[in-house]
Image (spheres, rainbow, N blue to C red):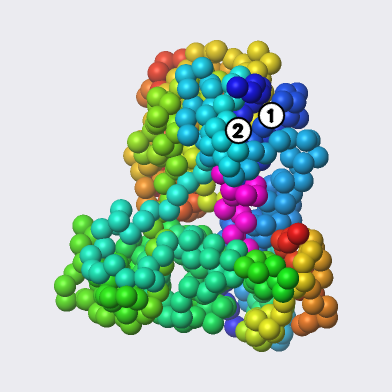
């Protein structure tokens, strides 16, 4: 099977041709190694980094931006969002603090800080 | 009246990078004036990832990218006047600002303009209909959701497919809203292809090209919009009109450099970019006043804003240190297929100059041709070009002097 993909790793957005045979993916059209990795992953098990905001219990009206430290399986994006909706942080929070450990094989970490 | 060597107006990515670069060049007395409570500018609300790959070699979210530069200015002890808004810049480079503490006047040796840009509003777009609540510029909605934690609506139509519109389509979807449509009046999207893939296609959000919002409906709150395809003159085609019920309309229809200060100071403005006319060191028509970032030209990537700001910061420092050049200039011109070229003036000094430009329309298999008078001095083949992706051409300065008085860049289709 052949698939045409747009690499989403960097703004260059290379058009990738992926050839899938017996579970092995060969990628062409990529300008760098990350493009090849993306092409393979996108065909076998698409992954995405998710970013969102959560509430801060002791700082009314403040939102804390967070992200998954690593990409998670694409099919779990909305499950993760549901978990994040019920989640709050407690100030002070520093950039890089772990907000939630061990979720979909990674962590949710703060990308902003609240004093 | 206070005195500082370099005053930087704006504490976003451009202002912070310019400040750090000027400091590192040897001018220690650098201050930033920022109208917001915290530095970082628009990056604070851009919580998505994809920043920094070019400049920092790692992928960061907006707040993380901003934090890298906040730390840089803190480490250097660069003062930020927060909650302070500049109201004028005089001819002798006295900067006047208002703040909670009253009026602030600073006499500067050099000024760097880094005020960023603003979104085009509904009024500027002339969309007919009522004036209900629920019509936001995409960036306003982004700020409300990401900084204030306030969700703006449930059923959404987005007009404009620039990157902010695409990013907001995904953001609204992740927060539980239903994005009914992204409409783009042009026959192509102005956003990066990667954003069409990861923001629209990933979530099955339809993108309608050559389509606009013809009318807004609703009394207190938005109830729906009429969308229509447009003809070649961008006029809605009556027979294609259809109604989409929605409670929220986000407008992502272009960014305008915020140059009221620049204009009031009598500095020359380029009518196409909406920013100041500059040389390759980002010096404006006023000696000792420099400009960088989105106030100069609207960029696609913050990485390029940081690069441009470093150029301006270094040049401002050199000006203060008396190391600036007054080499003669030639002008640059946008030729066939090119909307603008920046810098608008090239000083004939140094080894090479980077020309930044945007093409008029998407094309493939072209070459960018740089000519001096009638003579071709360099060509750059490109597999594909698009208005949404700024081009950078490195041209040797030695080749630019000579027979003509201007450098023209044009797009030619490869034979």
Q: Earlier in the sequence, mark 2 or mark 1?
A: 2
Q: Residues within 10 Å of mark 1 (few under 14, many from 20)?
A: many
Q: Main secondary structure of the magenta part?
A: loop
The one nearer the camera, B291 or B74, is B74
| Left or right of B266, for residue B290 | right
Q: Nearer the viewer, residue B293 or B380?
A: B293
Residue at 64% over, 38% down: B81
User: What residue would you read off at disc 2?
Assistant: B8
Instruction: Give the x, y percent position of residue B384.
Output: 47, 53
Front position in the image: B39 or A91: A91
- Magenta stretch contains residue A81: no
Task: Give the image location of residue B96, x and y in percent.
Answer: 52, 29
Residue extending farthest left: B238
Up-down relation of residue B366 to residue B135 (above or below): above
Q: Chain of mark 2?
A: B
**Residue A69 screen position, x and y as percent:** 77, 69
Whether residue B6 is visible: yes
Residue that appears at 83% across and 78% down: A101
Residue of label 1: B30
Is the Cβ of the residue at disc 2 closer than 8 Å to that at disc 1?
A: yes
Quick one: B253 or B245, which is closer to the camera? B245
Chain letter for mark 1, please.
Answer: B
Q: Residues within 10 Å of mark 2 (few under 14, many from 20)?
A: many
Residue B333 sits in quarter: top left
The part of the chain drawn in magenta is: B35-48
Cα distance in 3D space between marks 2 and 1? 8 Å
Residue A76 appears in the figure: no
């Amino acid at each position: 099977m052949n698939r045409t993909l747009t690499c989403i790793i960097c703004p260059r957005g290379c058009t990738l041709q992926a050839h899938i045979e017996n579970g092995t993916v060969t990628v062409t059209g990529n300008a760098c190694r990350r493009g090849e990795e993306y092409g393979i992953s996108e065909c076998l098990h698409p992954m995405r980094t998710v970013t969102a905001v959560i509430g801060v219990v002791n700082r009314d009206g403040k939102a804390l931006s967070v992200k998954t430290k690593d990409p998670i399986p694409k099919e779990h994006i909305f499950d993760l969002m549901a978990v994040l909706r019920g989640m709050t942080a407690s100030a002070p929070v520093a950039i890089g603090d772990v907000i939630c450990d061990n979720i979909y094989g990674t962590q949710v970490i703060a990308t902003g800080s609240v004093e | 009246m206070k005195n500082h060597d370099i005053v930087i107006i704006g504490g976003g990515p451009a202002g912070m990078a310019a400040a750090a670069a000027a400091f590192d060049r040897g001018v220690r007395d650098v201050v930033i004036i920022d109208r917001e409570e915290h530095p970082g500018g628009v990056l604070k609300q851009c919580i998505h990832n994809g920043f920094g790959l070019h400049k920092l070699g790692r992928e960061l979210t907006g707040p993380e990218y901003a934090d890298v530069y906040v730390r840089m200015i803190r480490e250097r002890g660069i003062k930020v006047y927060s909650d302070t808004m500049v109201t004028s810049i005089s001819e002798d480079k006295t900067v006047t600002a208002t703040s909670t503490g009253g009026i602030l006047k600073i006499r500067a040796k050099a000024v760097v303009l880094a005020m960023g840009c603003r979104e085009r509003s509904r009024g500027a777009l002339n969309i007919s209909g009522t004036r209900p609540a629920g019509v936001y510029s995409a960036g306003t909605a982004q700020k409300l959701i990401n900084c204030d934690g306030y969700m703006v609506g449930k059923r959404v139509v987005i007009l404009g497919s620039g990157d902010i519109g695409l990013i907001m389509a995904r953001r609204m979807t992740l927060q539980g809203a239903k994005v009914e449509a992204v409409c783009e009046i042009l026959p192509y999207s102005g956003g990066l292809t990667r954003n069409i893939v990861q923001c629209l296609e990933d979530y099955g959000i339809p993108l309608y090209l050559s389509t606009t919002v013809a009318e807004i409906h609703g009394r207190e709150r938005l109830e729906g919009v009429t969308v229509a395809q447009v003809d070649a003159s961008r006029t809605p085609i009556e027979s294609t009109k259809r109604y989409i019920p929605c409670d929220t309309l986000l407008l992502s229809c272009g960014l305008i450099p915020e140059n009221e200060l620049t204009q009031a100071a009598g500095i020359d403005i380029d009518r196409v970019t909406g920013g100041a006319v500059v040389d390759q060191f980002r010096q404006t028509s006023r000696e000792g006043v420099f400009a960088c970032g989105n106030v100069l030209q609207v960029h696609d990537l913050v990485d390029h804003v940081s690069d441009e700001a470093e150029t301006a910061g270094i040049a401002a420092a050199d000006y203060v240190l008396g190391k600036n050049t007054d080499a003669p200039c030639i002008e640059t011109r946008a030729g066939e297929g090119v909307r603008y070229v920046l810098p608008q003036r090239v000083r004939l000094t140094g080894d090479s100059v980077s020309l930044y430009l945007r093409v008029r329309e998407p094309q493939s298999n072209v070459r960018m041709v740089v000519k001096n008078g009638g003579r071709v001095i360099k060509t750059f083949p490109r597999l594909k070009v698009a208005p949404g992706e700024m081009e950078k051409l490195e041209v040797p300065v030695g080749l630019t002097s000579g027979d003509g008085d201007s450098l023209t860049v044009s797009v030619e289709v490869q034979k």
